[in-house]
Image: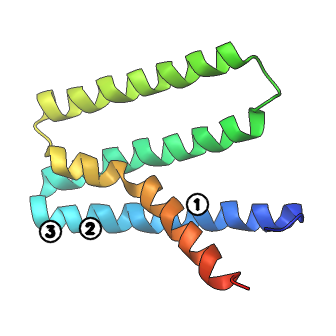
Amino acid sequence: MSDDPAFYDHALRRLDRIAMVLAVAAVIAMTFVEGWRGTLGAAGGSLFSLASLHRWKRVAGAVGASSKTRLRIRILLGYALLAASVFVIIRYFGVSAWSVVAGLFVSMAAVMLEILFELLTNAK
């Protein structure tokens, strides 16, 4: 790893780009697999995933700067809101659960691809 702060800035920007590309890919794939309901589900799941990624980046930047209890409560409330939203989308809008799940995995896949990129390009 590097002590250069620019190294981490580049990695975070690359992570955002990877996540956006994966979100678009998930939406397109679910359009062909599940139709318009799959498109809506993947788009919604991707938006939730990208928002969660952004929130985790803010949490990482705020560690040590604010109250730990307040931070935990905000994280728990965020995930409770996410769970309720996903339930409503799937249950009442008739959107495919698989398409929502595909969208929700966008940020996790982006992080894994970024780790793989760093391992392959910075191997010594």
Near-viewer residue (84 or 92): 84
Looking at the rendering, in which quadrant would you find the N terminus?
bottom right
* Three-letter code, disc 1: Asp
Q: Which of marks 2 and 1 is nearer the N terminus?
A: 1
Mark 1 or 3: in front is: 1
Return the x and y of residue 27 as percentages of the image width and height: 29, 61
User: Is 32 positioned to the left or the right of 59 in the image?
Assistant: left
Q: Residues within 10 Å of mark 3 (few under 14, many from 20)?
A: few
Mark 1 and mark 3: Cα distance apart in space: 25 Å
| Residue that sits furthest to the right in the current view | 4
Q: Are marks 3 and 2 in contact (CB under 8 Å)?
A: yes
Left or right placement of residue 114 versus residue 50 in this view: right
Which residue does the numbered mark 1 point to in the structure image? 16
Among the 4 quarters of the image, the one containing residue 54? top right
Tell me how far mark 3 sits from mark 2, CA to CA: 7 Å
Badge count: 3
* SS category of the residue bearing label 1: helix
Which residue is identified by label 3?
Answer: 32
Q: Name the residue under label 2.
A: 28
